[in-house]
């Protein structure tokens, strides 16, 4: 009988792993199965553009099966529990399935119910998210004839997927209202639990400056406790209140309930799986591996990160099934475009130990792109990402970007700062 | 840039350079600088932070809130301002890096 590699989640990371492993493992010996709840693959980075009418909703949807190789078995099932000691998973239906190697790629979703008052009577009336398809589409309808007022963009937590998306949303909102000739009727406030627009010093400096230029007020160190639907305010744990007419919320992001049921997550209850940050092996079971947003790695939760992880994880799973040591190591590499509005975008490239730095990013075929600076070329890169995503990334093709972060082209003029840990 | 605070070197932002040199007396002095008188509850939080930090846990306000020692609201009352930053300085551990 063939041995089984089971992948839970056919999103960005799981689909990439199915493609890569299918081309690498011996098909006489191994069977690959991938499961997901449904057959709809969303291009999540596209959710950012839907509220402003830049993408039409149908442009971000494709069937999952289009990207899963024919020789890989795709099942529509919801996994309820992973029983690591028994090397099996339990489906919602109660049926079980055994595995030799398991890959957890279940991603994260918004959990507005974690914050009192968030998903209440104003939800999708005056309070919106854009991290879901439904939220992005509802918000597009709302913005279409919104007369203006105070728009508050609020992050409920620090660990969210695509941490630059809320900034991009604010920049695009500024451009959208400007182009509609109503920017003077709109106040945009960016209310964050961080101490500035972003976490890392150099990028924060650039982003804070952009915020100022675009007249977006940053309200830092605001940790959301609850939403008051009657007063239309958001309230922090230390009692600060910010009133809104329109609230764009990035709710707490949580891993799937299967992680909780399987007791594989961190103590904070966010269902991020305890994962070795270099090898991507689960900390609990040696034949269980973790990839994408659902890991607890101190790295960005982004599609580009999942891509770099997939390169490393493929190598390590091949080593594992050949009983060799896991020698490939992930360095926390992330590479993200930041849409800054009016046809421009900035680019950041960083890893566990190196913060985003200014300079040039060498890119084969396309030429160098500017780091930490809004340019037209970067914007083209951002829009091209959708094509790259559907045609290259998901199907596991090599991209012209190195897996490990490179210092080539980056400028680091600061002296050693002891504060950077 | 480093400065010496109560005989121990801290970095430009006031975080103790070497967590192993930390003493309770030093912590008390630093807390006083923030107008905080350390109670048993404060100490429990500080000990928990030091333990988790030594285990390599990436600390967040949320994790303190689910530690069983205190909840987020009380954490803000214990260490007003930026509770995680202030308590980390007093606990003599490096600046918590929020992941991105
Ligand atoms: C608004 C927005 C903008 C973004 N912009 C960018 C960008 O510009 N660049 C970038 O690189 N990234 C971006 N991202 C992030 C990117 O989309 C994610 O990081 C990426 O999709 C993560 O892949 P994943 O496979 O870990 O999770 P997902 O792609 O979310 O897939 C997880 C899958 O697991 C399935 N699943 C979960 N639990 C179960 C279960 N119990 N049983 C069966 N199936 C299950 C889900 O149905 C889902 O299909 C953005 C995200 C958002 C929301």
Image (cartoon, rainbow, N blue to C red):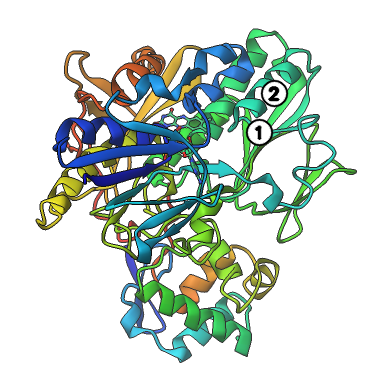
Q: SS of the residue at dot 2?
A: helix
Label 1, residues with CA under 10 Å away: few <14, some 14-19, many ≥20: many
Label 1 marks a residue whose chain is A
Residue A183 x, y percent position in the rendering: 70, 17
Which x, y percent locates residue A348? 34, 33
Q: Is residue A362 visible?
A: yes
Q: Which residue is mark 2?
A: A139
Mark 1 and mark 2 on one chain: yes
Q: Is residue A5 above or below residue A169?
A: below
CB under 8 Å between discs 1 and 2: yes
The vertical placement of A17 against A261, above or below, is: above
Quarter of the image for the C terminus of chain A: give it: bottom left
In the rendered image, which quarter is residue A25 located in?
top left
Does residue A389 sit above or below A209 in this rendering? above
Closer to the camera, A55 or A177?
A55
Q: Which sits earlier in the primary sequence, circle 1 or circle 2? A: 1
Q: Secondary structure at mark 1?
A: loop
Reading the image, the residue beneath label 1 is: A129
In which quarter of the view is residue A237 placed? bottom right
Q: Is residue A374 visible?
A: no
Residue nearer the viewer, A32 or B22: A32
């Amino acid at each position: 009988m063939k041995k089984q590699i089971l992948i839970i989640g056919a999103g960005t990371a799981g689909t990439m792993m199915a493609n890569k492993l299918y081309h690498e493992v011996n098909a006489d010996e191994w069977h690959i199965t991938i499961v997901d709840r449904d057959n709809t693959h969303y291009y999540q980075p596209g959710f950012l553009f839907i509220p402003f009418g830049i993408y039409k909703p149908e442009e971000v949807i494709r069937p999952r099966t289009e990207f899963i190789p024919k020789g890989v078995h795709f099942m529509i099932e919801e996994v309820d529990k992973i029983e690591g000691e028994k090397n099996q998973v339990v489906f919602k239906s109660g049926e079980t399935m055994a595995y030799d190697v398991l890959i957890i790629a279940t991603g994260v979703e918004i959990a507005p119910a974690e914050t009192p008052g968030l998903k209440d009577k104003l939800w999708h009336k005056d309070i919106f998210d854009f991290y879901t398809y439904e939220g992005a589409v509802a918000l597009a309808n709302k913005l279409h004839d919104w007369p203006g007022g105070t728009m508050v963009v609020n992050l409920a937590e620090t660990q969210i997927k695509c941490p630059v998306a809320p900034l991009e949303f604010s920049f695009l909102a500024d451009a959208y209202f400007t182009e509609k000739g109503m920017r003077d009727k709109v106040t945009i406030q960016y209310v964050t639990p961080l101490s500035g627009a972003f976490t890392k010093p150099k990028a924060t400096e650039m982003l804070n400056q952009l915020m100022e230029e675009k007249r977006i007020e940053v309200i830092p160190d605001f940790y959301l406790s609850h939403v008051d639907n009657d007063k239309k305010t958001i309230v922090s744990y230390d009692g600060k209140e910010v009133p809104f007419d329109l609230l764009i919320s990035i709710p707490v992001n949580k891993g799937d309930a299967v992680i909780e049921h399987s007791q594989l997550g961190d103590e904070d209850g966010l269902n991020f799986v305890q994962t070795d940050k270099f090898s991507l092996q689960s900390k609990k079971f040696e034949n269980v591996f973790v990839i994408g947003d659902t890991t607890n790695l101190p790295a960005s939760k982004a599609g580009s990160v999942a891509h770099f992880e997939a390169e490393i994880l493929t190598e390590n799973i091949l080593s594992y099934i050949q009983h060799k040591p896991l020698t490939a190591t992930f360095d926390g590499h992330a590479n993200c475009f930041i849409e800054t509005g009016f046809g421009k975008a900035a680019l950041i490239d960083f890893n566990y130990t190196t913060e985003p730095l200014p300079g040039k990013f060498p890119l084969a075929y396309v030429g160098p792109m500017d780091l930490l600076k809004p340019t037209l070329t970067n914007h083209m890169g951002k829009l091209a990402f959708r094509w790259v995503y559907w045609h290259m990334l998901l199907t596991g093709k090599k991209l012209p970007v190195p897996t490990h972060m490179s210092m080539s082209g980056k400028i680091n003029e600061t002296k050693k700062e002891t504060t950077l840990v | 840039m480093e400065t010496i605070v109560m005989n121990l070197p801290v970095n430009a932002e006031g975080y103790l350079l070497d967590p192993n040199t930390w003493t309770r007396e030093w912590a008390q002095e630093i807390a006083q600088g923030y107008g905080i008188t350390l109670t048993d509850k404060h100490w429990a939080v500080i000990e928990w932070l030091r333990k988790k930090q030594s285990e390599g846990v990436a600390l967040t306000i949320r994790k303190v809130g689910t530690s069983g020692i205190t909840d987020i609201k009380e954490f803000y009352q214990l260490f007003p301002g930026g509770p995680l930053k202030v308590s980390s300085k007093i606990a003599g551990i490096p600046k918590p890096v929020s992941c991105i």
